[in-house]
């Protein structure tokens, strides 16, 4: 079974539940994906350089 994950990025968190002026992307992953592979899939979708930016999940 696959799951879709909505990614919101590139702008400002206003509070724990409010994020403004963001971009939306999404990925599909298996429900059995490991955390390391999930992080890699998100970094690939966002084209993030893991050495220059810290991705917090």
Image (cartoon, helix red, strand yellow):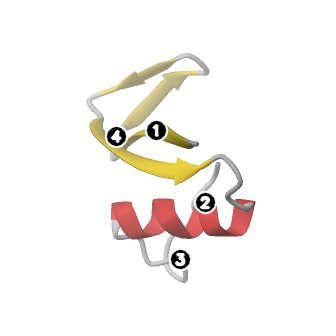
Q: Do the CB atoms of the residues marked 3 and 1 lie less than 8 Å apart?
A: no
Which numbered disc, 3 or 1, marks the residue closer to the eye?
A: 1
Query: Label 3, on which residue?
Result: 50
Q: Give the quadrant of residue 17.
A: top right
Which numbered disc, 3 or 2, marks the residue closer to the eye?
A: 2
**Residue at the (46%, 38%) spot, across then down:** 4
Q: Which tag, 3 or 1, sits closer to the chain's start? A: 1
Judge whether 34 appears above or below 31 on screen. Answer: below
Q: CA distance from mark 4 to mark 3?
A: 18 Å
- CA neighbours of label 4 inside 10 A, class few (<14), some (14 to 19), many (20+): few
Q: CA distance from mark 2 to mark 4?
A: 22 Å
| Element at label 4 | loop
Query: Label 4, on which residue?
Result: 11
- CA neighbours of label 3 inside 10 A, class few (<14), some (14 to 19), many (20+): few
Q: CA distance from mark 3 to mark 1?
A: 22 Å
Q: Which tag, 3 or 2, sits closer to the chain's start? A: 2
Query: Label 1, on which residue?
Result: 4
Query: Left of 31 or right of it: where is 53?
Result: left
**Residue at the (49%, 65%) spot, across then down:** 41
Q: Where residue 42 sits: x, y (%)?
A: 48, 59
Residue extending farthest to the front is 1
**Residue at the (33%, 47%) spot, across then down:** 10
- CA neighbours of label 1 inside 10 A, class few (<14), some (14 to 19), many (20+): few
- CA neighbours of label 2 inside 10 A, class few (<14), some (14 to 19), many (20+): some
Q: Where residue 25 sits: x, y (%)?
A: 31, 44
Q: Do the CB atoms of the residues marked 2 and 1 lie less than 8 Å apart?
A: no
Which numbered disc, 2 or 4, marks the residue closer to the eye?
A: 2
| Element at label 3 | loop
Give residue 38's mark.
Answer: 2
Say which quadrant the N terminus sits in.
top right
């Amino acid at each position: 079974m696959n799951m879709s994950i909505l990614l919101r990025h590139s702008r400002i968190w206003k509070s724990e539940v409010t994020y403004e002026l963001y971009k939306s992307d999404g990925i599909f992953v298996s429900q059995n994906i490991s955390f390391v592979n999930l992080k890699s899939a998100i970094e690939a979708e966002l084209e993030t350089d893991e050495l220059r930016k810290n991705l917090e999940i």
